Image: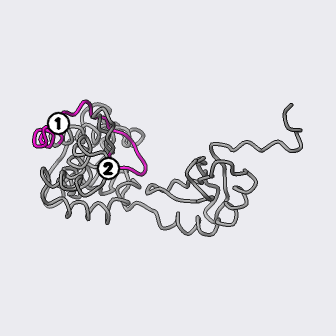
Amino acid sequence: MGLPRLFARTAIPETTELVIASGPVTVAVRVNARARSYRLSVSARGEPVLTVPRGGRWPEAQAFLERNTGWLSARLSRIQSPYALAPGAIIPLRGSPHRLVGLSRLRGLVTVVNEGDEPQLHVPGGPDHMRRRLVDWLKKEARHDLETACTRHAQNLGVTVSAITLRDQSTRWGSCSSSGSLNFNWRLILAPPDVLDYVAAHEVAHILEMNHRPVFWRTVAKTCPHYERPKAWLKANGAALMAL
């Protein structure tokens, strides 16, 4: 016999809406078996996540969320990317600032134009299609650079990369599966080349060491000896790129 309706647990939704100072925001809800308490966090791209422990009750989770409205409002106000994918904006490409120029013609490819001291990215398709055209092009550039870097690091470490996939991740720059499949965030193409190279080396090294123990970092150093510098750069500047 099931529980009477009066005592039935309220189902925990996948998302919920919360009104903060800047207006309503959607909060993703994640049930985590390892969590011991309710937790509210914000990804580098400004996506709020409410973690609920297994066995947690939705009314308690809602009350926790309401108590932290002020914190969430303040946190979101600080996570703003200095970059925008719009005509006239400046974004980094391989670490070098480029101004975006929208072209009215519908056909054509994104091109890099070096005029004076300010490199430009000319994007066809008009303002309605600029973001999609530009992101598609950035992904192609990222794939080329990552495939080249991963091939070199795999040869250095004597391993095989089974596949390379680009993803629109909100918190991670890369990941490695047990089968040797590597996933990368396409925004790495915005970072300086040595940063992209470091992340490629990091994930290739995981094919040998699926952990972050000292032996893993020694493996990274074998193929990317000066990894500490790009690692520190990504820690300091990655959030701005991730929020794009």
Question: How would you rate the neighbour count of disc 1 (Cα within 10 Å): few for under 14, some for 14-19, many for 20 or more?
Answer: some
- Alpha carbon separation for disc pair 2 and 1: 16 Å
Question: Image point 37% across, 60% down: which residue?
Answer: 240
Decide which of 72, 87 is in the foreground and name it.
72
Q: Is residue 129 above or below residue 96?
A: above
Type of amino acid at the residue the image marks with label 2: Asn
Question: Image point 18% across, 42% down: which residue?
Answer: 145
N-term mark: 2 or 1:
1
Q: How is the image coloured?
A: one colour
- Horizontally, is 227 left or right of 24 in the view? left
Question: Image point 12% across, 50% down: which residue?
Answer: 223
Number of the label disc, if any, that sits on residue 159: 1
Which residue corresponds to mark 2? Answer: 211
The picture quadrant where one finds residue 230 is: bottom left
x then y, percent, for residue 90: 30, 57
Looking at the image, how many numbered discs can be counted on the residues?
A: 2
Decide which of 202, 238 is in the foreground and name it.
202
Number of the label disc, if any, that sits on residue 62: none
Quadrant of image for the N terminus: top right
Type of amino acid at the residue the image marks with label 1: Val
x then y, percent, for residue 56: 69, 51
Magenta stretch bounds: 150-174
x then y, percent, for residue 193: 18, 53
Residue 201 shown in magenta: no
- Horizontally, is 37 left or right of 115 in the view? right
